[in-house]
Structure formats: C-alpha cells, structure tokens
C-alpha cells in the first residue's frame, strides 16, 4: 500500500470518527444507519488492497464531507439553543450541592430521643398531679420544636383538623391535659412516639401516638394543651414523617433537572423536515446498487486492459 493510499484511509478513519460523534449526539436512527454503511465501505477498502483508493476519497468528498458539514452546523445551533437550559441545570446542581452540605442529619436521631424524653415528661407530670406538686420543666420538651419546627414541621395542613373543642382537663401550671388522654397514657405506662410536627399560621402542633394502641394525641404548643385526636379528623390529616424543607427543595430541583435533561435529549433528536428528507435520500443513494458499483467498479480497469490488448493486436 503506497503513501497516498495510507493517507486516504487515515483521512477516511477521521471522517468516520466525526460521523460517529455526530451520530452519538443526535441519536438519530438515519444518521446511525449512514455511519454504519459508511464504516462498511471504509472497511471494504481497508481489507481489499486491490481497490482504487481514490474512489474512497471521491466517495467521501461527494457524500461524507457534505453530511458532516451539515450535521456539524445543526449541532452547533442546537448547542447554542440548549445553552440556557444547560446553565439552568448547572445552577440547580449548585443549589442542590449547597443544600445537601447544610442539611441537618440529626433530626431522625433526635426525633427518637424526643419520644423517650416526652414519655418521661408525661410520667413525671402524672406523678406530680397525684402528689399535688409542680416540679417538671417544660423546656425539657419544648427544645425540640424550637430546634426543628422552622425547617421540618409541616406547614401545609388544615389547622381545624389539629384543633380541639372544650374537654375535661387537668390543669398543670399553664398547661391543660385532657383527663381521658392522661388515663390512656397511664394504661400504656406513658410510652409515646413522636409522629410529626405541624407549623400552621404561626402555631406549632405535635402529633404523638400512644404505645401499643390506636390512640393519637396533639400537643398544642402555643395553646399549651394536650388532647386526644378525633379519628375522623385523623383520616384527613397528613401524618407522614417530617422532611426538611431543604429536602423538599432538593427533590424539586432534582426532578426539574431530570425533566430538563429529558427534554433536551429529545430536542437533540429532532431535525428539520428538509434535513430528515435529505438523510432519507442519502440512505437511498448508499443502498443504490448503481452508486455502489461505481465505487467498486472494475469495468473501468477491464476496458483499459481491453483497449491496450486491442492496440497490441493491431500492431
């Protein structure tokens, strides 16, 4: 193989690389098909040293180069069009990264500890009531909402579902505890589990579940009272575990990025109708036996040989 043939094959390989990159970018079936057919033609010349390599070069000049130029222009245009979307995705990622770094990881652990603290608080409260004394410190339980309400407590809730009407209650300092609630707490040895918190209209509420029962009760922090919940209201209340509002924002931004990336990927595949038509014609030409026969035609060499033989015979 002479130097010219080596150079033609090398240039052909570079064209194939460009075409493959474009096919990967557009993810278009027709472009992928063209790449595969062009690769087959290249390999035929590479494996058959008797072929005329100038015809491979001519094929690329007539077909491949024009296609690469067209697709490259469209690719640049699409990249410019998508630049704003790419920037938005990147900004969202920075916000996500920033939120995740600052995210509070202690809530779940503290929530479990808080359940135990509240259980002890209720037990001590009951003991004080039976002995007509006031020894407990409400800060032993109020610390939790002060630390986490702003970030974690649910703001989207119907406050009427959290409130209660009048009820028979024990008075302990400034706090009211429903009599029926205290009786049920006593049955279960005051074991409770913090379910979730609510922060609605400037008021904080905490929902608890009594151990080994179907009973729930509300701690109205601003109203300074505790009372059993109405089961019919509970059915309408969102009692899912609290999430950081930062987590909500992070999830929203991640979902938005997924949607933007999906839309961008689809937009890349869409080509102008006239370009799609050109690609269809391009494939037809590659599949046309007349075109292929011109590339691999040996008739030209046969005719030259015949002419030379005739010349010799005549002489």
Image: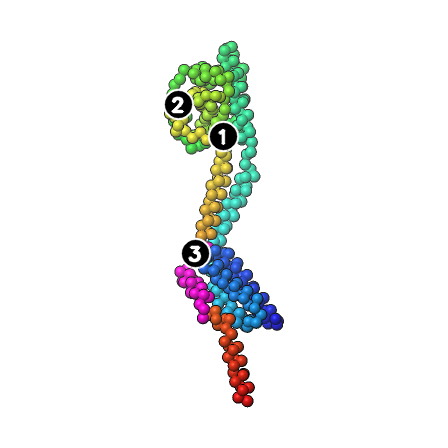
| Total numbered labels | 3
Q: Label 3: state its secondary structure.
A: loop
Q: Which quadrant of the view contains residue 178?
A: top left
Residue pictured at 45% horizontal, 64% vertical = 283
* Mark pair 2, 3: CA separation: 56 Å
Residue pictured at 47% horizontal, 43% vertical = 255
On the image, the x and y values in percent for residue 63 come to 48, 67
Q: Which residue is mark 2?
A: 230
For disc 2, the neighbor class at 10 Å (few under 14, some 14 to 19, many from 20) is some
Q: Which residue is mark 3?
A: 270
Q: Is residue 96 in view from this perspective?
A: yes
* Mark pair 1, 3: CA separation: 48 Å
Span of residues in magenta: 268-290
For disc 1, the neighbor class at 10 Å (few under 14, some 14 to 19, many from 20) is some
Is residue 240 highlighted in magenta? no
Colour scheme of this structure image? rainbow
Mark drawn on residue 149: 1
Is residue 276 highlighted in magenta? yes
Q: Which quadrant of the view contains residue 54?
A: bottom right
């Amino acid at each position: 193989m002479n130097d010219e043939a080596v150079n033609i094959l090398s240039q052909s390989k570079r064209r194939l690389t460009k075409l493959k990159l474009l096919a990967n970018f557009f993810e278009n079936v027709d472009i992928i098909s063209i790449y595969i057919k062009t690769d087959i033609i290249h390999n035929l010349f590479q494996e058959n040293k008797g072929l005329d390599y100038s015809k491979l070069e001519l094929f690329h000049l007539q077909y491949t180069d024009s296609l690469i130029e067209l697709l490259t222009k469209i690719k640049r245009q699409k990249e410019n069009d998508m630049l704003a979307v790419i920037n938005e995705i990147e900004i969202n990622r920075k916000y996500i990264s920033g939120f995740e770094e600052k995210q509070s990881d202690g809530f779940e652990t503290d929530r479990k500890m808080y359940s135990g603290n509240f259980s002890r608080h209720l037990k001590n409260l009951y003991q004080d009531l039976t002995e007509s004394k006031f020894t407990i410190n409400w800060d032993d339980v109020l610390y939790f909402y002060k630390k986490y309400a702003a970030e974690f407590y649910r703001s989207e809730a119907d406050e009427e579902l959290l409130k209660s009407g009048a009820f028979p209650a024990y008075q302990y300092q400034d706090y009211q505890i429903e009599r029926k609630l205290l009786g049920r707490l006593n049955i279960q040895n005051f074991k409770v589990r913090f379910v979730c918190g609510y922060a609605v209209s400037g008021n904080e509420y905490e929902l608890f579940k009594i151990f080994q029962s179907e009973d729930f009760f509300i701690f109205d922090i601003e109203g300074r009272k505790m009372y059993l919940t109405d089961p019919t209201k509970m059915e309408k209340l969102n009692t899912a575990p609290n999430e950081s509002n930062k987590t909500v924002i992070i999830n929203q931004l991640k979902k938005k990025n997924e949607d933007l990336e999906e839309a961008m990927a689809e937009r890349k595949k869409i080509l102008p109708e006239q370009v799609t038509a050109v690609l269809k014609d391009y494939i037809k030409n590659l599949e046309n036996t007349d075109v292929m026969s011109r590339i691999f035609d040996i008739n030209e060499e046969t005719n030259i040989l015949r002419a030379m033989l005739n010349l010799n015979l005549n002489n």
